[in-house]
Amino acid sequence: MTDVLIAGSGPTGLTLACDLARRGVGVRVVEERPAPHRESRGKGLTPHSLEVFGALGAAERMTAVGRREIVLRKYFDGAHISDTAMADGLLIGQWQVEEALRERLAELGVRVEYGAGLKALAQDGGGVGAELSDGSVIRARYLAGCDGGRSTTRRLLGIPFEGYTEPEQSMVLGDVRAPGLSRDFWHQWFTSDGGGILLCPMPGTDAFQLQASPEPDGRGQPLPPSVESFQRLFDRHARMPGIRLADAGWLSVWRVNVRMADRMREGRVFLAGDAAHVHPIAGGLGMNTGAEDAAALARTLAPALDGPAGDEALDGYEAERLPAAAAVLADTAQRHERVMAAVRTPGRGTEAGRR
């Protein structure tokens, strides 16, 4: 029997695994994906998250790859209006954060088990039995569901995910190359019709993360993301005919999603990160909130594994992190509204979502 089984190998699951493993806790990490991804996704770490990763011995790997300062170059209707320097964290792709954490976890003697997503679970007074998609069964004293917004763990527990999802698609995203476009700036083009496109240079790569208003089809419905659609959006908003986008390595869509689990613990099973809460991307707090969840859960589980811990002690995790999640949901919803209002003014950009 392992001490803690972690479902999901994103930043939350890997942070929890590193924190527990360095304390001498037996950990296994299972992941539904067949292999690691290389997608930028969440792209910013706060100073507090860097402190968390520093305690784990992983921060130096991240700062060696990431970028401390980025200049937001704002355009309006194709014209350059203003620049704003931002230096309140670390710009880094999510895949690079995960890579650094996997390397640290391997040094601690643990490797992610891929192609093994959680399929079923059953718990009793002595532990949790987890059936995996590869047909294996793992017995653990505790299980942590760090398996994202569509969490299988949360679904198997029957925990409600309360809140709302806006029906309209808000954004298309992707990782693209843009030869000829300066990598010294996070380019943010907005137009008087309310649309826009952003290209952020991802450190350690030759790619930009693209964020844009969806392109409508003839019926006004959003077209799926593609490099061809990205190019049309770029031509419309950026108005730089010499730039041709290429090599879309990641394509995704995003809509406003504000939801929170009504509890983060069910017996010997815990939820953390996006499995427990999802919120608007303004401020870039998603990956960071997950890291804070993981650190708090490790502080809760480690003493319980060393000796008898009553429900009151185990409930300490939920007592700390559930109010924190509620505060982040409210905060990011307000930040999102500020950004959407601000970008209609020439010279304003995503910095409006910062505190």
Image (tube, rainbow, N blue to C red):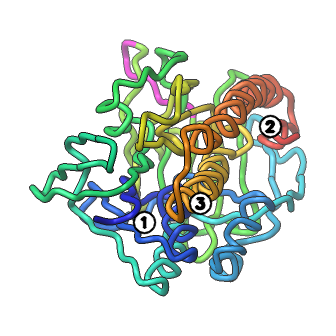
Disc 3 crowd rating (10 Å Cα; few below 14, some 14-19, many 20+) is: few
Q: Which mark is residue 303?
A: 3
Residue 138 image offset from top left, x and y in percent:
22, 58
- Pointer 1 residue: 38
Query: Which of the two residues, 183 or 19, is positioned nearer the viewer here?
Result: 19
On the image, the x and y values in percent for residue 276 come to 52, 36
Query: Is residue 98 depicted above or below 316 in this figure?
Result: below
Quadrant containing the N terminus in the rendered view: bottom left
In the rendered image, the residue lying farthest to the bottom is 107
In magenta, the rendered stretch is 213-219
Question: Where residue 329 appears, x then y in whole percent?
Answer: 68, 28
Name the amino acid type tagged 1.
Answer: Arg
Q: Quadrant of the C terminus?
A: top right
Q: Secondary structure at mark 3?
A: helix
130 horizontally vs 90: left or right: left
Residue corresponding to mark 2? 353
